[in-house]
Image: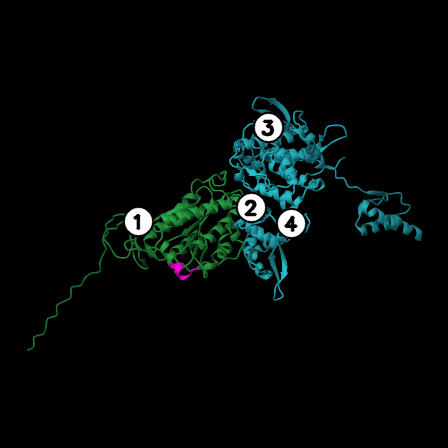
Chain colours: A green, B cyan
Amino acid sequence: MCADDEVSLLVIVVDVNPIWWGQQAQREPEFTLSKCLDAVMVVGNSHMAMARTNKLAVIASHCQDSHFLFPSKSWRGADNGGDDASSSGDGKYELLSVANNLIAEEIRNVMSKSEYKGNSTETLLAGSLAKALCSGQEMKSRILVIKAAEDCARQYMNFMNVIFAAQKQNILIDACVLDSDSGLLQQACDITGGLYLKIPQKVALGQYLLWVFLPDLEQRSQLVLPPPAHVDYRAACFCHRNLIEIGYVCSVCLSIFCNFSPICTTCETAFKIQLPQMVKPKKKKLKQPT
Amino acid sequence: MKLRVQLQCKNLHEYLRELSPDLLDRLYNHPATCLAVYRELPSLAKNYVMRMLFLDQPLPKAAVALWVKKDSQKHHDECVSVLSGLRLWHSQQLQGGLQGYILNPVFKDNLRIALLGGGRAWADEGSTLGPDRHARDIESLDRYAMERWEVILHFMVGSPSAAVSQDLAQLLVQAGLMKSETGEAPYITSAGFQFLLLDTASQLWYFTLQYLKTAQSRGMDLVEILSFLFQLSFSTLGRDYSVEGMSESLLTFLQHLREFGLVFQRKRKSRRYYPTRLAITLAAGVTTSPVSSYSKLAPTPGAGDAGFIVVETNYRIYAYTNSELQIALVALFSEMLYRFPNVVVAQVTRESVQQAIANGITAQQIIHFLRTRAHPVILKQTPVLPPTITDQIRLWELERDRLQFTEGVLYNQFLSQADFEVLRDRAQGLGCLVWQDVPRRVMVVTPQGHSEVKRFWKRQKSHT
């Protein structure tokens, strides 16, 4: 039987970009942010129901910042005497109903209070992932990212740093993509050993989460799960954040540039490059007509 | 020579498998039970249940078999047998004629309620009664729980200061942990000794199982009691719950739990009760590792702290405790040397261990006892106990195991060799021959085979 005393943490990072979700609500009214959060709560509840030592954290990733939806105040959610949040009297396991109420309240706060400027459809995923990594320090943990909006090229550097940090700490990053494929998340899943899935039907999000992303590492070795996708490993240049295939690499700090520049902007080393010899075109003497 | 009775500590699943099918179905009517049963499943089975939880149609067996990779086939088979044995799913014919699996509908609905809500409340929250003026904090609850549980253990060891109710004493006798002659106070049996050396979580679970066995004879509804127990095990520590809506038999059960230390109620007529840590770890029972569950159960020092025994390679035991009960337990299998205000020094000798074994305790239990109460300093080394000590305790136990007893019936004084051989071959053919000595024409047959062999012999004699 399973005698797992190790605390196992599941961090769910939800992309709550209001612009994307607003457009989504107009495209497909049957799948809105609240439905997505319902599915997230189902998966979170299932994870916590699996074992007494399982813990859950939910982070909402907004345009310019990220918030912890659960646990909101202290980390020791399970040992609290259930002071503020009263459980719903509808047969749900107490621990789960406290968690669900907290999540619902926090997401309402986040969506109503956050101010955002501009109409960018970018979300600060790297920041949320960094927060998730920090919270999963002392225990076995994994991160599930639910991505809605497109990738933001400006976050490339931070993202790669987060991915390598997760790989070092043996933290899996799984990705569940709702709309457009994300090269960054594909790389993250490939490097850390997690699962990447682009969902064909958004309405069935809950079922996909339960079937594919609920099992933990040792159970995954026994189950048949979607195979890894083809990963786009192109790097982004440091000057424009464009994805390039051929570029210039500084030999000191290994930063990537798309154009040659005599001084590396990261480590400020000066370079001289041997340009091919310029041959001066010989002036052809015009034959004088005799 | 008495044959030693081993204390069997069943876990939750084995207990449930023994219940009758309709009792099980009634049991699954409560979300708490479903959640408790779900938690004890092997992890692959949990995933299977989760996948099928939100499906309303049966899944073909072939499809389910494809869920696992080729080399995990035996895990799949194990899960199938566990889930079928607990009646969590059953086979159903699909439309195409294939066999499919579908989750037990009662179980499915109640597990869904436990996860998502939408059903009735399990119990009334204490919030309807208003805040408690005499609220107890978690520390005092823990102290109360350990105190009450230790009174029971003290009573078993025979301390004169421990007094328990008539009901409880009778339960102990029925459980086989104590024996009572008429008119005398009960005294402990060898099974009782083994019980004492278990860790608290296993003791609780064993005790509860015994209680449940006698519950039906008391006229209590087994399903009601079990559901309430599981509900308790999922409650939050430090929170009070109200007794509203509890039936008579449940209220009696609550009083018994109060005596075991599983709940705290200020007065008998009190309208609210507090579950203690013992109740919450009850359903976690035998499957969690003893060390961690024990350390969670006894945070107060002096009254059975987590880890207070240091075992040295010179066969000395240093027990940093001043609890009478713990000292009495250590004295069961070792010789006391010195006693100080906070330490007791004992030595494990051949005589002391063999005396413990004569009382019915096994070497494995002694080693388990030492390991679960090992001091945190000792816990850091691997292995926790010195291998010399554990091996030597086992060897001392084996010294008594030089003889193996098998019951049998002796056949001798055969008149001729031919008679002997005919009967011997017949017994061997039946598979009940235990031993034979051909030159002396003596053979031993098992008691079960004796009647058959005797009949055959009588027929033989009447022929010749």
Residue occupied by mark 4: B26
Residue at 56%, 23% (x, y): give it: B342
Mark 4 and mark 3 in contact? Answer it, CB < 8 Å.
no
Structural crowding at the residue carrying mark 4, measured as other residues with C-alpha within 10 Å and reported as few (<14), some (14–19) or many (≥20): some
SS class of the residue under badge 3? strand
Whether residue B256 is visible: yes
The chain to which mark 3 is attached is: B
SS class of the residue under badge 4? helix
User: Distance of mark 4 from mark 1, alpha carbons?
Assistant: 69 Å
Query: Which of the marked residues, 4 or 3, is nearer the chain's N terminus?
Result: 4
Q: Amino acid under label 1?
A: Cys
Residue occupied by mark 2: B121
On the image, the x and y values in percent for residue B205 come to: 63, 39
Span shown in magenta: A23-29
Residue sticking out furthest to the bottom: A290
Give the foreground label among 2 and 1: 2
Q: Is residue B375 placed above or below A102 in the rendered structure?
A: above
Which quarter of the rendering shows the N terminus of chain B?
top right
Q: Amino acid under label 4?
A: Arg
SS class of the residue under badge 2? loop
Q: Which mark is residue B302?
A: none
Seen from the viewer's position, the closer of residues A127 and A37 is: A37
Residue occupied by mark 1: A253
Q: Which mark is residue B317?
A: 3
Mark 4 and mark 1 in contact? Answer it, CB < 8 Å.
no
Mark 4 and mark 2 in contact? Answer it, CB < 8 Å.
no
Residue sticking out furthest to the front: B129
Seen from the viewer's position, the closer of residues A157 and B212 is: B212
